[in-house]
Amino acid sequence: MNFFSGKQLLDLCKENNLDIWQVMLDREIETSGRTEDEIFADIEHSLGVMFHSIDQGLATYDHSLGGLLTGQSKKLYEELGEEKFYLPDRTLKVVAYAMAVMECNARMGVIVAAPTAGSSGILPAVLKDAKETMGLDTQQLAQAFLTAGAVGLIVMHNASISGAKGGCQAEIGTSTAMSAAALVQLKGGSPKQCLDAASFAYKNILGLACDPIAGLVEVPCAKRNGLGVLNAMLCADLALLEISSLVPFDEVVDAMYLVGISMPATLRETALGGLAATPTAKRIEHDLFSNSELSKGK
Amino acid sequence: MGNNSLFDVIGPVMVGPSSSHTAGAAKLGKLARQLVHGEIVEVRFILYDSFARTYRGHGTGKALLGGVMGYDLDSEEIKHAETIATFRGLKFSYEEGQKDGIHPNSVDIHLIEESGKETILSGSSIGGGNVVITSINGIETRLQTNLPALVTHHRDRVGILAEITKFLAQKKLNIAGMNLYRNAAGKDAYMVVEIDQIFDEAISQELRDLIDDIMDVFVIENR
């Protein structure tokens, strides 16, 4: 059982009366030659690392390696409880989770790339929230993990998940699409609804540039993971209402890819354009790297 | 691409912040470490281009050093690699190098043993935590591997490959891929044999003793 597109995946689900996670699990067993138990054990390990990275991020105000992140997730998390913000506290808590992973990452903590390090906050955040608010067990979380993996796999095959190739839309876009599909699965949505949610996720941020200040995975990456959480939850809710994506998932992925490769290189992780090219960003970059002690060898 | 695993999509489990500048760097360090048998007393890293410019903000140096000390890319210890190295008495230094037409995330790793013997590995981190080894001790390679592998350092001559592959067949080890690198006929050569099965490290010693003109054999565990 293998699939290379959203259409093939949906066909397999329909023909065999399976959910996306079951097709993905069969495929993984087939291609890796490993047992279901071994695969579930690895998923459980990854989930453990994901949730630990949230705790680590929220634990301190320690600065990141580049010094641009200074415990913003902890600040947000600790202000919750009085419903004093525009967004409900529960929603902001998930945003704080996603930003916490990014702070853990930027302090050289251990994270799970999902699908990349720069977009590693969204999936752990929405899964932790679903676990807490819906009382899910590890088996159900593993099903969501497999659903997210199936979406990412199709994108890796037909487009790209790297900011250097496709801009931020390829990184945050893909993690959001994966997370939205996972959330639909957790509420019992159909395979088609999962891919509809993934389609919405890209459509909402198509064209987003990758322009990190000083080339570091810090600003604006952490907040964009926060935005990804909101986008994923919104898209899951819309898809669960049986609102269909007018453009099918495969065509949306193609569009994302074409937008990515038509972006100038300055907007693809080179730190030469966008936010990274502003006078303030240039000043930060200069200050950071001018005191680097690298001697000129050879 | 058709064979990507679930854990290629959601993974690797790694120390942050960057798969190319941190996770890939740790992998390169560990690969270099596996090309040395003795104890390493000093390591010099020559960093190029983007590796040199942003190494501090990405922890590239710590990741390289942690890898050289044998830590995997998901080890908490990588963050503290410099402290651990100092504690262990391992000397380390970072320098900036310049080379034309090189991949932006590249490094030369010089490993010096107590005897003074120096091993030099050059490599690049090409994205997503994947790496390519571009030279071993001055012999150009283009090696990308995710499987366990044997690396032989031998003298190029007629029939030596046949002897090595026959030996592996007798050990019931299946060869997944083979690459041979040399600068000139009849001189030093390196061969990298990727193997499907996990194998006992002792076979490297056996191979070295058994076949003439093999100077050294290394095992890359690649977990």
Image (cartoon, grey):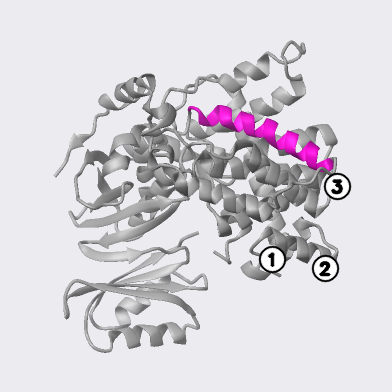
Residue A58 screen position, x and y as percent = 61, 25
Which of the marked residues, 2 or 3, is nearer the chain's N terminus? 2
Chain bearing mark 2: A
Q: Which residue occupies 49% across, 80% down?
A: B174
Is residue A238 within the magenta segment? yes
* Image mark for residue B1: none
In the rendered image, which residue does mark 2 sit on? Answer: A15
Q: Amino acid at mark 3?
A: Gly
| Observer able to see residue A47 | no
Is residue A140 within the magenta segment? no
Q: Which residue occupies 33% across, 87% down?
A: B163
Q: Nearer the viewer, mark 1 or mark 3?
A: 3
Q: Are marks 2 and 3 on the same chain?
A: yes
Tell me the element at label 3: loop
Chain bearing mark 3: A
The residue range painted magenta reads: A219-240
Tell me the element at label 1: helix
Residue B206 screen position, x and y as percent = 36, 78
In the rendered image, which residue does mark 1 sit on? Answer: A27
Viewer-closest of A59 and B202: A59
In the rendered image, which residue does mark 3 sit on? Answer: A188
Residue A105 vertical position relative to residue A82 in the rendered view, above or below: below
Q: For the view shown, which residue lies furthest in the left direction?
A: A298
Q: Quadrant of residue A75?
A: top right
Mark 3 crowd level (few <14, some 14–19, many ≥20, 10 Å Cα): few
Q: Amino acid at mark 1?
A: Arg
Mark 1 crowd level (few <14, some 14–19, many ≥20, 10 Å Cα): some
In the picture, the quarter occupied by the N terminus of chain A is bottom right
Q: Are marks 1 and 3 on the same chain?
A: yes
